[in-house]
Image (cartoon, coloured by chain):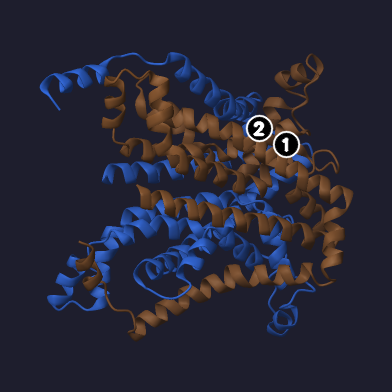
Chain colours: A brown, B blue
Amino acid sequence: MLTQEAVARPKAGRSQDWGLRGASLLYLLLMIVIPILVIVQDGFREGLGEFQRQIALPAARHAILLTLWTSALMTVINALAGLATAYVLVRYRFPGKSLLNALVDLPLSIPTLVTGVMLVILFGPQASLGAFLDQRLGFQVIYAPPGIVLALLFVTFPFVVRTLQPVLMDLDREQEDAAATLGASPWTIFRRVTFPALALPWLGGSLLSFARAVGEFGSVVIVAGNIPLRSQTAAVYVWGAVESENRLGASAVSIALLALAFVMMLITSRLQRRWQRAG
Amino acid sequence: MTDMGVRRTERLRRRPRQPWILILGVVVYVSVVIFAPIAALVGRTFQEGLGSVLRAAREPEFLQSLQLTLVISLIIVVIQSVLGTATAWVLERHEFRGKSLINSIIDLPFAVSPVVVGYMLLLLVGRSGRLAPLLEVLNLRVAFAVPGMILATLFVTLPFMIREMGPVIRNLDFEQEQAAATLGANRWVTFRRIVVPALRVALVYGMALTLARSLGEFGAVLVVGGGIIGRTETTTLYVFRALEERNYLEAYTAALTLGLFSVVIVSLADRLRRREE
């Protein structure tokens, strides 16, 4: 009924519509576009050379690289765990399922700073588990990269699961049944029939968690602390630079983070449009 | 499909062969990554006994921070409910150039680091910011004050309401609106009587998500507000300071209160949404 809808769609152009459109576009312009333009202009104030020099400073470079690899590692783990969780939640019945389903959503409402506090309690030097891992196994979690990965895993856990769940639920089971009738093993069915239908949303959800992780601050600053060249992520570096009035450094690393966020969001929205058209 | 084929697939579907190892793996993963940290916070807080927790919950600085957090969050919810709904409406029902670009920009706050958000605002409204001369003339204090913190929280919560309302506005039945218009209802009456009831559930859910995100905002309000005790210290900033000062019980109590509050609000809204469906 596309044509009917097109006819019924009210024609924009009346004065009230223009007022509404103007107001909401102005809101977006003031809230998002202008702050970004200001920071980009500030970062390149001293020219491209100075921007590159600021990014290449050892502490800044280490912070950016640490952010990228911890986020990437988290994304791989989260992609696999999220796929398994969504699949299990949609396809099987087992005791405790509704509790599991409720737990998936919690990271969306728990403040990320609180997440950091939780992880320090669990893995910190005072905690028995943390002390055990540190002294017996020599594996330090808090104030070290593993803590960052754990914090990011907590914060981004819902993204892959909640992207895949509706897709899995809407999936037509007849093809799987046909494959089963033809004697395919469950693993072959998953690999050849189910997974191809999930691939795009899976990639989208995973990239979304990566994008979210790169900028994460609240949980990371608590869990990793602020140790340059060791556990300081890019967002924490920007905070330190702002505090010490290192405006050039703060602007340069901020722009790097902004550019990354922008590219990631463009890619995920493209992917989203593609799988929605396909589905 | 033949009769036998149907029966065969039915049987295949009902066959209770569950991959228990996969299910167990998922349960263990969620228990370790999500459940264990939450249990640790709850357990550690009450380890000191209920009395000490209640005493920590009555700390004047904590209560003051909670009040500020609530005031800011409620202002945010009101602004986003109005402007977010308007923006979603414009994006769904109006056609104009650059719409797809705007659509990708809207999700940007979701990925931009809160620290960067705070810093961008400082560059605009800070002491040597772009708008400093103007703000001085108007005698407005924005940075290291509540208005700056409201702006920062507006930025980080921007996508929630718009993304919650978008699909509902898209699926609205135009025929009802047209019928109302045909019966002589003016645009405001149509909006109030037809559109608002249809949007109600999404509105409540969007408000809950926005509220939870505002309550928990930390990085942006830290940078732009400065965490001045009694003036710009929200509850997240109070937790941060209490940790630094090694007042662990105060920090844990405040963190637990904040977390519990957000979780309850979102799950109430979630329940409402499920009931309506």
Report if the CB atoms under discs 1 and 2 are less than 8 Å apart: yes
A86 vs B232, left or right, is left
- Mark 1, secondary structure of its residue: helix
Q: Between residue B14 and residue A42, name the one nearer to us.
A: B14
Q: Amino acid at mark 2?
A: Leu
Q: Residue at x 41, y 16 (%)?
A: B19
Q: Nearer the viewer, residue B63 or A129?
A: A129
Instruction: Calculate the distance from the C-alpha at mark 1 to the C-alpha at mark 2.
Output: 9 Å
Residue B146, image x and y in percent? 65, 64
| Residue B188 point in image, percent of width and height | 27, 75
Quadrant of the image for the N terminus of chain A?
A: bottom left
The answer to which quarter of the image holds residue A262 is: bottom right
Which residue corresponds to mark 2? A150
Q: Name the side, left or right, on which B170 lies relative to A85.
A: left
Q: Amino acid at mark 1?
A: Val
- Residue name at image x 42 percent, y 38 percent: A198
Residue B2 in view: yes
Question: Do we see residue B74 in this rendering?
Answer: no
Q: Name the subunit of mark 1.
A: A
* Left or right position of A269 against A120: left
Residue identified by numbered label 1: A223
Q: Residue at x 38, y 73 (%)?
A: B95
Image mark count:
2
Residue placed most toward the observer, A84 or A127: A84
- Of the image marks 1 and 2, the number of the one nearer the N terminus: 2
